[in-house]
Image (cartoon, rainbow, N blue to C red):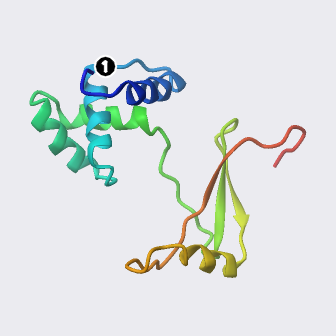
Amino acid sequence: MNSLKQMDRGALSDALDHSGQRTTPQRATVFSVLLDERDHPTADEVYSRTKSRMPSISMATVYNCLETIEREPTRYCPNLAPHAHFHCRDTGRVYDVPVPESMMKDLAKVLPGEYSADSVELVFRGHLSKGKTQ
């Protein structure tokens, strides 16, 4: 865990504490790999990069480490209309949030000129207001 900066070590500890996990050398190495390039690698790419630093690590261990860092299940949305999602941290439920199509197009315009978006995904995370239920 010495390769992680103090601030990064704290972020990893906070993320693991939130999920009831502890920091291990494998988790610290995987997290360090993610921080080094910040290019949103696939699990296979993380495995390859981690294996060069920790030759004894298995693909299963890398997957387990990634799950402790980002522990959200894959979800499937049948709503094909432009919309956002709200993830409730209390219940784990996901709600569709209508967003005007013009706003979604405006969001795509914030991209630098060399990028072109075919779609936009907008996600809110938080808590439902007290007394509100859905």
Expressed as whole percent of the image width and height from the top left, the position of residue 52 reads 10, 37
Q: In front: 67, or 18?
A: 18
Residue plotted at (47% across, 79% down): 118
Q: Categorize mark 1 by other alpha carbons within 10 Å: few (<14), some (14-19), many (20+).
A: few
**94 to 33, vertically: above or below:** below
Q: Is residue 66 left or right of residue 45?
A: right
Residue plotted at (84% across, 45% down): 133
Q: Dividing the picture into quarters, in which one does residue 47 lie?
A: top left
Q: Dividing the picture into quarters, in which one does residue 99 lie?
A: bottom right
Q: Tell me the amino acid under the disc marked 1.
A: Thr
Q: Is residue 39 left or right of residue 16?
A: left
Residue plotted at (44% across, 40% down): 70
Residue plotted at (65% across, 64% down): 84
Expressed as whole percent of the image width and height from the top left, the position of residue 76 reads 53, 59
The residue sitting at the right extreme is 131
Q: Dividing the picture into quarters, in which one does residue 49 lie?
A: top left
Q: In front: 129, or 81?
A: 129
Quickly name the residue at label 1: 24
